[in-house]
């Protein structure tokens, strides 16, 4: 695949985009990164993802792959010989997919509500958020990574959120370290990997971004 | 895998449960079907799916696989030699996963709203529902099945909904045949398969079920 053309349509604060950046870095695949302005989406994005009109989109030799988890599976299947991201056992694969799905269905939403809501709704979100983190800590157990000894699929699905934790903690008034020390230890372990460190934006830059969003949404 | 113990915790009207029933039938795998009373969930269900507490759950030699699409992928991977459900090309696989995801994220919800809402909200749901069906018809194109010449992953993800169409049409006051004839032709084609015909309940039985739910929810 020497002459592959690979383009990633992305937006720097997107934890979903980060999944593809990390997976591509783990596989040591070169690609062209194109930053999208989500208030003024490019014709290429609208053409490549006409259904959802969302980033990230991976474009491989002109053909789009949409939805980040599906993109990570695609990368795993096309570049299967280098740095396997999913386990080989079908049951372990199903479990990895289950936790990635859990992160999308439950965790994302509770995190978002921490900085978009107030009062009772925010209190409920705080409870959900900590509960989700504890469930995830339970799934991690005593392993260094969700993938076991190796960084893998669920680690990739989850670690991008860590760049938002400073914002979650600031606006949600929570301390992840105090509530979920094992989660934080896992996140710091992941951050030691080059693939992760270079794919995640600075937490303070994300906080500035969230601040502008809160102004735009009329929350503050 | 002669001595495999395979149990499906399910509920007969569930289009998600139907996916597993069809996939297992396609692969000609024997299993024990256990009907769950969703108002009084069994200790086994709560033990096997403590996170979501939902059916369907496939239990293979004591180990649970939750979330229906993940279950279909599991069945495909464990019994890979018989009746392949996913294409072998990574791009085609990503497309199949994309459409299954679309059905879960967009189509399910618009269908549900057809019989749970009234007035403006229902009108919006009707528009969404028909729009989703047309998008799906576009993805089907001129092929006999979403999987091409062969019945496959997306067909399995979608066809269970067809048993709910009589209810959607009755309460949503829509005619799928008039609006989306290609969809209906596809559904009838699927219904000719034994795996589908024996996995889907009668549309009138589903309508009776929906009627009792509407009473319970105070809609009529």
Image (spheres, coloured by chain):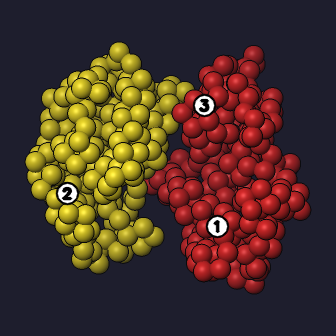
Chain colours: A yellow, B red
Residue picked out by circle 3: B49
Residue at x 36% of width, y 21% of height: A148
Label 3 residue SS:
loop
Q: Residue furthest front?
A: A119
Q: Is residue A77 left or right of residue A187?
A: right
Depth check, front residue: B131 or B111: B111
Residue picked out by circle 1: B113
Answer with mark 3 or mark 1, whichever residue precedes in sequence.
Answer: 3
Q: Is residue A67 left or right of residue B27?
A: left
In the rendered image, residue B104, in percent from the top left (x then y), is placed at: 57, 56
Foreground disc of the pair 3, 1:
1
User: Is B61 situated above or below A122?
Assistant: above
Q: For marks 3 and 1, give the CA distance.
A: 26 Å
Label 1 residue SS:
helix
The subunit carrying tag 2 is: A
Depth check, front residue: A63 or A9: A9
The subunit carrying tag 3 is: B
The answer to which image quadrant residue B217 occupies is: bottom right
Q: Is residue A40 left or right of residue A204?
A: right
Could one spot residue B11 in this view of the protein? yes
Numbered circle sitting on residue B12:
none
Residue picked out by circle 2: A210
Q: For marks 3 and 2, give the CA distance.
A: 35 Å
In the rendered image, residue A189, in percent from the top left (x then y), is placed at: 20, 26
Foreground disc of the pair 3, 2:
2
Residue at x 66% of width, y 63% of height: B112
In the rendered image, residue A206, in percent from the top left (x then y), is placed at: 16, 52
Q: Neighbour class for label 1 at 10 Å: few (<14), some, many (≥20)?
A: many
Depth check, front residue: A208 or A55: A208
The answer to which image quadrant residue B150 occupies is: bottom right
Depth check, front residue: A169 or B22: A169
Q: Neighbour class for label 2 at 10 Å: few (<14), some, many (≥20)?
A: some
């Amino acid at each position: 695949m020497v002459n592959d053309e690979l383009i990633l349509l992305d937006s720097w604060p997107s934890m979903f985009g980060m999944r593809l950046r990390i997976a591509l870095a783990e596989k040591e695949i070169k690609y062209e990164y194109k930053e999208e302005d989500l208030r003024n989406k490019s014709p290429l994005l609208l053409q490549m993802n006409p259904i959802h009109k969302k980033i990230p989109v991976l474009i491989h030799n002109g053909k789009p792959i949409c939805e980040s988890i599906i993109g990570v599976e695609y990368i795993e299947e096309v570049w299967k010989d280098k740095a396997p991201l999913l386990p080989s056992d079908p049951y372990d694969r199903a479990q990895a997919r289950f936790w990635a799905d859990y992160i999308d269905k439950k965790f994302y939403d509770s995190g978002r509500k921490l900085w978009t809501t107030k009062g009772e709704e925010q209190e409920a979100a705080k409870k959900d958020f900590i509960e989700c983190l504890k469930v995830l800590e339970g799934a991690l157990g005593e392993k260094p990574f969700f993938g076991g000894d190796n960084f893998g699929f669920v680690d990739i699905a989850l670690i991008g959120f860590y760049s938002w934790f400073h914002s979650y903690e600031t606006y949600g008034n929570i301390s992840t370290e105090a509530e979920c020390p094992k989660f934080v230890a896992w996140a710091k372990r992941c951050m030691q990997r080059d693939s992760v460190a270079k794919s995640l934006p600075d937490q303070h830059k994300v906080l500035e971004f969230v601040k502008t969003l809160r102004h735009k949404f009329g929350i503050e």
